[in-house]
Image (cartoon, rainbow, N blue to C red):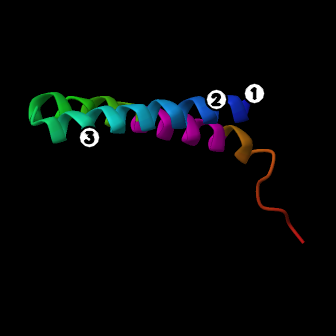
Amino acid sequence: MKKLSAIIQIVVVLLLIGFGTFHLYKGNFELSMATIPVLVGFYLFMLSRQKKAGSAGHGEHGSQER
């Protein structure tokens, strides 16, 4: 399931970047820059999910004493 969600995330990001690039070359600067808040929000969402997953697994795989 993680592989499928990663593929979906990559496709969504590439579509947003492609959409912004297409409209930038057509001269519609406002529409091309409108994708930036979506990409930043997506990045922050993924960053918070990654931190949450890292802190949840930290107790199990903490430092081991030798």
Mark 1, other Cα within 10 Å: few <14 / some 14–19 / many ≥20 = few
Q: Amino acid at mark 2?
A: Ser
Mark 3, other Cα within 10 Å: few <14 / some 14–19 / many ≥20 = some
Report if the CB atoms under discs 3 and 2 are less than 8 Å apart.
Answer: no
Report if the CB atoms under discs 2 and 1 are less than 8 Å apart.
Answer: yes
Secondary element under disc 3, as helix, strand or loop, is: helix
**Residue at left offset 17%, top offset 41%:** 25
Residue bounds of the magenta highlight:
43-55
Q: Nearer the viewer, mark 3 or mark 2?
A: 3
Q: Quadrant of residue 49?
A: top right
Q: Quadrant of residue 5?
A: top right
Residue that label 1 marks = 1
Residue that label 2 marks = 5
Residue that label 3 marks = 21
Secondary element under disc 1, as helix, strand or loop, is: loop
In the image: residue 23, left or right of residue 44: left
Distance from label 2 to label 1 (Cα)?
A: 6 Å
Secondary element under disc 2, as helix, strand or loop, is: helix
**Figure quadrant of the N terminus:** top right
Q: Nearer the viewer, residue 39 or 15?
A: 15
In the image: residue 61, left or right of residue 55: right
